[in-house]
Amino acid sequence: MTKYKHKPPWVVVLQRFSANKMGVIGTILIACLVIVALFAPLLEPYSYKEQNIAIANEPPSLNHIMGTDDFGRDLLSRTIRGARISFVVGVLSVLISVVIGLVIGSIAGFYGGVIDLVLTTIADLTWSMPAILIALLLVAIIGAGLESVVVAIGLSYWAQYARLVRGQILSLKSAVFIEATKSMGASDYVILFKHLLPNSLSPVIVAATIGIGNAIVLEATLGFLGMGAQPPTPSWGAMMSNGTAYLFISPWMIIFPGLAMMITVLGFNLFGDALIDIMDVKNKESS
Amino acid sequence: MWIYVLRRTLLLIPLFFIISVVVFSLIHLVPGDPIDSLLGPGSTSADKIELVKAHGLDKPLTVQYFVWLKNFVTGDMGQSIIEKQPVADMIFYNMPFTVRLGLASLFISFFLGILLGIISAAAKNTFIDYISMIIALLGVTVPAFWLGLILMLIFSVMLGWFPVSGSGNLQTLVLPAITVGMGGAGLIARITRVSMLEMFNKEFVLLLYAKGLSKPAIIIKHVFRNALMPVITIFGLRLGWILGGAVTIEIVFSRPGIGNMLLSALYRRDYPVVQASLIFLTMAVIIGAFIADIMYSYADPRVRDVYK
């Protein structure tokens, strides 16, 4: 450790990160996803929604690398457009979970007592439930569609962040620097927002990276069950849900969107794992 | 030990009440009316009022809850609005299928996960280690329903080894159980590996080597037994994954089961069925965590001593 003594912390992190092969692979995969999501309209060889029944259910060929679906739409273009949807859904829903988790976790950890007991019980109950069940019920309440899926996923995954934040705040609360701040007359507000929260963020960020991958899978699963994005939206889940009817005729309708999703999730997991390794965060639960 | 078990058992009762209240109120937020789908063409609004009354849906929500709770505790889970049969019958018909799938996946998760974990820990930083960990990572990251479809495509359609769907014999269980079990297997493999590697660094292992024990004996008899603790904890807490996976996979393989029942009831707004199956699934998750706790306290006396 001594050789990093005079370097700023972000340089240390960057150096350790680039030495982590798996982390670098994860970063490249995520970078690819972001590029594809950003430039989707430029990268699509065909229109993602133009139908042409004459070439329906065509196997992969040079013209259509991933083949075509039951409406003759180019699967590559749809998978590219799906990357954009998945990425947006993943990031937005994790943001919702993290915000809820930060609020509930910090209140529980900071105030303790009965408030803590009640909030922790709720968080533990939510956490032990399969996310798919919570999300299904929520989508049934607020209605199918992409926006409600984002909200439902956000509300299904908040508990793990709340638990993390609470644990961090509890362990930081008794730290000497907090005691010093208190003795200098800082208000609860200042202590919580200026000192406790910023110092509890790193495990949350790590969990959130892996969480994006989980959220993308959950979105696809909801789509697959017919409770997510509705056709003709080219969400990976909706595409595969549509493809199940043609599993024996044109399996490429399921294979390629699924592969795209698997690679994406792998990217976020590798990236998150590398972060855990280099930051040495005790965070085994969230993987 | 028994006091600890008793305390934990008593805690399940308030949990049941909380869950039933939450599920009950959430279900009644679901828009759409099951009564509408029951009414045939040409029925009048008087018919509707009569049906609403017959199902007790005209009473205030709190009254409905207590009526439902009283019946539930006495084993009467109400009548399915759509299927027109007792919900209890539907649950008991579907339950065995889900339990079988769950147990089979649990077995696969543990067997495959621990095996992979031990192998990669014993062969740390070798080619075998990397391959095992890549399999484990893929198990964690692959979306379960997609894996199910791909397995079906390869082993049912192309090779014809297993039936595409159904629920009759053991053969129909293989693919769904592998599909649901893979996620757990990946998780367990990774935890087992980390936990075993931590154990290898302990001094008692060095002592065992000094005493001249062979490496396999040390790994299996001593390191593995001590490394199992985190596996039990994590797994007990994540038992919900198995059930959550089962819900989706029952649809993929068109198997009967609680998940399949829940989803079709959800589509048709069949409140009593959704309610009962959600409460059943939730309680199953909580009881799973409870059993893991008991196992944990049995394996590690320090846990139960806290309660003395």
Image (tube, grey):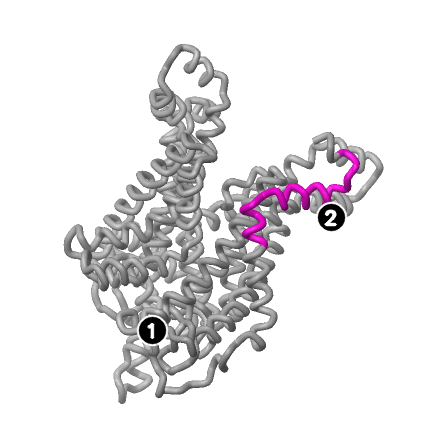
Start and end of the magenta stretch? Answer: A5-27
Question: What separation in Å lies between label 2 and label 1 (alpha carbons)?
Answer: 47 Å
Point 40% across, 40% down: residue: B188
Point 36% across, 36% down: residue: B114
Q: Mark 1 falls on what kind of element?
A: helix
Nearer the observer, B178 or A251: A251
- Inspect this view and state whether residue B67 appears: no
* Residue bearing mark 2: A193
**B47 on left or right of A47:** left
Q: Mark 2 falls on what kind of element?
A: helix
Residue A157 in percent (x, y) is at 51, 54
Instruction: Write down the quadrant of residue A118 in the picture.
Output: top right
Nearer the observer, B102 or B55: B102
Q: Which mark is residue B19?
A: none
User: Disc 1 is attached to a residue of which chain?
Assistant: B
In the current view of this chain or complex, which residue is farthest to the right?
A184
Q: Residues within 10 Å of mark 2 (few under 14, many from 20)?
A: few
Q: Amino acid at mark 1?
A: Pro
For the stretch drawn in magenta, what is the main secondary structure? helix
Instruction: Write down the quadrant of residue B54 in the picture.
Output: bottom left
Point 27% across, 63% down: residue: B153
* Residue bearing mark 1: B34
Position of the N terminus of chain A, as image quadrant, is top right
A159 above or below A34? above
Residue B138 in percent (x, y) is at 42, 50
Is the C-beta separation of discs 2 and 1 under 8 Å?
A: no
